[in-house]
């Protein structure tokens, strides 16, 4: 092991590094809290462009992921431009997240573009009394969904995986104060109980499940996909609503999209039934990404 790696793995050094990240994050949260929404977006856009040129390793992965999907469809120049906008979107979202809890309902809903019919539809699903899964992805501003649901009065639980930095978890829990939380590394059994109590489960389904998932095509390439959403839907009979918040370039607002509803169908073959659901969810995400490629998290190692 090299000297630098030994330093990196040292517990004392790790503790100091984590606290510094926490202190910087707290300072950023305080500044963002007092700034107008549109200024937060402008700062995030500038930081994203700066990060694109500084973070080389992640930049290469982003460009490689985009080329994996769009090679032969988009030019190298187009792919690089999308990659820049990916960085901008992620940085803007990172700053919008700590801003949202400090906004009034009027301010928050002024930043969203949605139709009453969409919300009525979600409430209608709950009248079936089987619960509902709100399934989204690291697309647009994915953090808006939990805040949006809480402000509309949905009884929601957010599935999350805690950070290895306990200080950052403290911040995250504070920002999620309007929702119940379920740590997926500890307590997945409560998901079924809450769905059966006719509650809403909110989750992101686009992460790499590694050896805990099932391999499915995603943009024509095999990707390990979590089986959880399909299993929960089949277990309780609840529908899965694939929905997203897409960033609107012209006015710093976000468009709420309900792309499709996936209904669980039990045939007696659990594996095939789960595959049927998960394929529909992946198709939903693919369709939205093709429309807004710059708004998905291509930095992530999905394949």
Image (spheres, grey):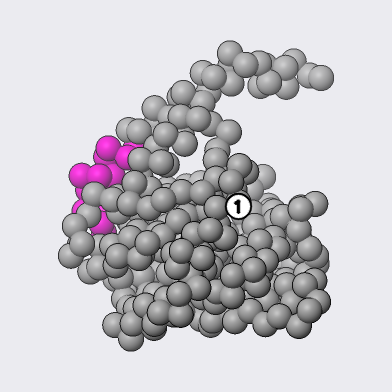
Is residue 220 visible in the rendered image? The answer is: no
**Looking at the image, is 102 positioned above or below residue 204?**
above
Q: Is mark 1 on a helix, strand or loop?
A: helix
Residue at 30 percent of width and 54 percent of height: 100
Q: Which of 95 and 120 is in front in this view?
A: 120
Q: Nearer the viewer, residue 78 or 39?
A: 39
**Looking at the image, is 179 positioned above or below residue 131?**
above
Query: x, y (%) of residue 7?
Result: 67, 16
Residue interval drawn in magenta = 28-40
In the image, 32: left or right of 145? left
Q: Does the magenta stretch include residue 31?
A: yes
Q: Which of 93 and 67 is in front in this view?
A: 93
Q: Does the magenta stretch include residue 46?
A: no
Residue that carries the numbered disc 1 in the rendered image: 189
Query: x, y (%) of residue 122?
Result: 40, 78
State whether the magenta stretch is mostly helix, strand or loop. Answer: helix
Residue at 58 percent of width and 46 percent of height: 187
């Amino acid at each position: 092991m090299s000297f630098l790696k030994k330093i990196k793995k040292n517990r004392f050094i790790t503790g100091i590094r984590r606290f510094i990240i926490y202190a910087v994050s707290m300072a950023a949260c305080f500044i963002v809290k007092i700034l107008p929404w549109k200024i937060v977006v402008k700062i995030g856009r500038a930081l994203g462009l700066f990060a694109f040129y500084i973070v080389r390793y992640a930049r290469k992965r982003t460009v490689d992921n985009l080329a994996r999907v769009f090679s032969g469809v988009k030019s190298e120049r187009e792919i690089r431009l999308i990659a820049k906008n990916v960085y901008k979107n992620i940085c803007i979202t990172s700053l919008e997240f700590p801003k949202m809890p400090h906004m009034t309902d009027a301010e928050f809903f002024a930043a969203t573009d949605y139709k009453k019919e969409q919300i009525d539809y979600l409430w209608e699903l709950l009248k079936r009394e089987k619960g509902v899964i709100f399934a989204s992805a690291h697309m647009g501003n994915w953090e808006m969904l939990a805040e949006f649901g809480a402000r509309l009065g949905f009884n929601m639980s957010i599935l999350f995986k805690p950070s290895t930095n306990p200080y950052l978890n403290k911040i995250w829990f504070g920002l999620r104060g309007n929702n119940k939380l379920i740590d997926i590394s500890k307590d997945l059994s409560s998901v079924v109980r809450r769905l059966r109590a006719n509650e809403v489960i909110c989750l992101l389904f686009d992460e790499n499940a590694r050896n805990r998932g099932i391999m499915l095509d995603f943009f024509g390439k095999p990707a390990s996909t979590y089986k959880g959403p399909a299993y929960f839907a089949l277990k309780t009979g609840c529908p899965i609503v694939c929905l997203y918040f897409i960033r609107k370039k012209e006015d710093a607002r976000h468009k709420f999209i309900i792309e499709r509803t996936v209904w669980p169908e039990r045939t007696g073959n659990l594996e095939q039934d789960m595959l049927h659901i998960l394929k529909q969810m992946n198709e939903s995400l693919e369709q939205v990404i093709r429309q807004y490629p710059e708004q998905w998290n291509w930095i992530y190692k999905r394949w």
